[in-house]
Image (cartoon, rainbow, N blue to C red):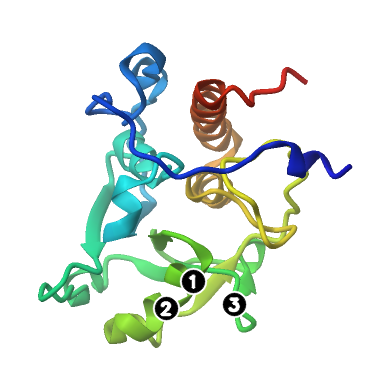
Amino acid sequence: MNPRSVVKFRNRKTVSPCEGCRLHLDRCICRFIPTLDLKTKLTLVVHNRELKRTTSTGHLAVKALLNSELHIRGKENEPLDLSSILTDQYETYVLYPSADAVAIESLVPKKPVQLVVSDGNWRQAGKLHRRQPELKDLPRVCITTKNSSSQNLRHEHFEEGYSTLEGIALAFGFFEGAIVRDQLLELYQHKLKATLQGRGTWLDV
């Protein structure tokens, strides 16, 4: 049996969640959120529907990274304009594994990087550059490391598929070093364990 098939994935709203980490108060992980002041900037674009999902992780990255912004798209009659994020201060890239994406390891940035990340499912993330025309000409980058984990918050459709927080951790690790990467990955592990324990599907491995 594929170990990934052991976990059953459900999207349901947590009753009376922690305002910080959005987990049940008994499983709050806010104390594990690091405070990281970095040159690399995170711009997280969250689909409105993602805000209600217990498997969402992008907001944890925003809380950990002082140099970050969160923007919400998908609200009815409230179009999102991201043109203000495009400045000469940063080299801006969109993190998404499209066919034209280049490996993030191949980048040689000449100034600080701004990483635009879509927090949503694959279908929602794939529409970002079409729904946000101001981003359509931005280069896209991808993570080539394969996900070997046997436990995930959601089913990953690709070997290189990761949760939003994991993807940010690996990407920021390239720009900011292994210590930053490991701190963010450790935060993800706390999120993963708390969420799966709440479902009764956590496996001690």
Q: CA distance from mark 3 to mark 1?
A: 12 Å
Residue 127 has which mark?
Answer: 2
Observer-nearest of 140 and 5: 5
Circle 2: residue type: Lys
- Which quadrant of the figure has residue 63? top left
Left or right of 140 on screen, residue 69: left
Q: Secondary structure at mark 1?
A: helix
**Residue at left offset 39%, top offset 81%:** 129
- Which quadrant of the figure has residue 79? bottom left
Q: Nearer the viewer, mark 2 or mark 3?
A: 2
Observer-nearest of 201 and 39: 201
First in sequence: mark 2 vs mark 3 = 3
Circle 3: residue type: Ser
Left or right of 19 on screen, residue 152: right
Q: Are marks 2 and 3 in contact (CB under 8 Å)?
A: no
Specify whether residue 47 is in view: no
Q: Is residue 50 above or below residue 135?
A: above
Circle 1: residue type: Arg
Which residue in the protein does label 1 denote?
123
Which residue in the protein does label 3 denote?
98
Q: Is residue 96 above or below residue 187?
A: below
Q: Are marks 3 and 1 in contact (CB under 8 Å)?
A: no
Q: Position of residue 30 (x, y in %)?
A: 34, 20
Q: CA distance from mark 1 to mark 2?
A: 7 Å
Specify whether residue 113 is in view: yes
